[in-house]
Amino acid sequence: MSALVDALKCHVAWQDVQGRLSQDPYDLWATRLGGRAKRSYYEGYVSGRLAGSAFVVLDAVAPSVRKLVRRPAGFPTADAHYVMGHLALDASVEGHNGADRSAVLLAALKRERSAGFEEYCWGYPFDWVSVNGTWAGGTPLITVTPYAYEAFEAYFEATGDADSLDVMRSIAEWASRRLPQTDISPGVQASAYTPFDTRRVINASAYRGHLLVAAGRRFERPDWLAAGDANLSFVTSTQRRDGSWLYAADGRDAFIDNIHTCFVLKNLTKSIEKTERCELRDSLVSGYAFYKSALLDGDALPKSFAVTQRPSLVRRELYDFAEGINLALLMLDHDDDAEAILVILLEELLRRWQLPDGHFVTRTTLLARHTVPYHRWGQSQAFRALTLAAAKGFLAD
């Protein structure tokens, strides 16, 4: 039995004890006081900076305090990743029966969809204070909903469940119809983050672009293909000369970080399989070169930021490891360094980040090691990435 499979079985045992509910990195900010502090911070008030800094330090030194202010919750992003992970684990663990576990999680996804829309869509179970204002809990997000599409797609491919196909079609209808689009130039459009904004966030357009070209191919919808292509054109047009992307192209949030770079690159990689546009591969190669040079350190371990706007106490993030592994798997056919990077990330994660009960360290900061597990912020993504690596035979004895 490989070390990777052993680690995954241990993580599954932890999932069984933990259940599908967890705390979240946003718990402190989702309180009334935390939300006020964050709004004040974004508005530039000194009081907001002081209050925000206090919350950051509190989270760094005493993360378990969140249990006193907010109950564990279910998260669509996490449920979707666990579905895909359990289905993938069937390839490595005889008798795992990922379909049964996935059916339970998909039923929860259906129950917890965003209200007020005839199509299936999902958001966060908390009010999200952002630089663009506050979005109420349940507001559907293009950065969440595509994972549900992929989860139902994986279940359909594994079981032939026709209802999953109907849900996938409904998700694509939502992405096509409900999200405002900003015309940049002919054939180039930036997608909104939610049905209620017009921001030009790069990863939001990458998510919608891939979702619609994937659904357009599957359901033979040329209109979806064209819409997805327009979003992908926006992504490639906003890439900077060094291969990087700012978080947004609207003058706000001008940082460059690890996970959002990975989000953009993985959507480009998956889109290449569904479109014949050669410029996507050019953008991908340039973007991954930037990732290797600016978002991995000299030991090929992930750095959280290449360009930051705000002080941070974070040293390393589980989420960065998870997305780095996922991206390296996708890049195996596109970059000669991807396999070596993949092995380094896998070995480091198993050697130093998995705890005896099976879950992973959430992050390390300049002050402490953070072990409160968040399904949405790293645990589920790491599980899925590791199951895909195991299915390909990495770290086999």
Image: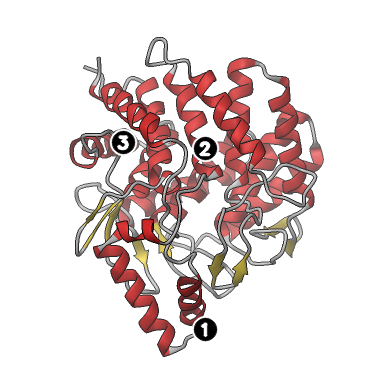
Numbered tag placed on residue 342 in the rendering: 3
Spatial CA span between label 2 and label 3: 24 Å
The residue mark sitting in front, 1 or 2, is 2
Q: Of 79 and 31, which appears nearest the observer?
A: 31
First-in-chain label (1 vs 3) = 1
Q: How many marks?
A: 3
Locate residue 76: give its quadrant. Answer: top right
Residue on which disc 2 sits: 79
Image spot of residue 182 (x, y percent): 73, 64
Q: Quadrant of the N terminus?
A: top left
| Colour scheme of the picture | secondary structure
Say what amino acid the circle numbered 3 marks. Leu
**Local SS, label 2:** helix
Say what amino acid the circle numbered 1 marks. Glu
First-in-chain label (1 vs 2) = 1
**Local SS, label 1:** loop
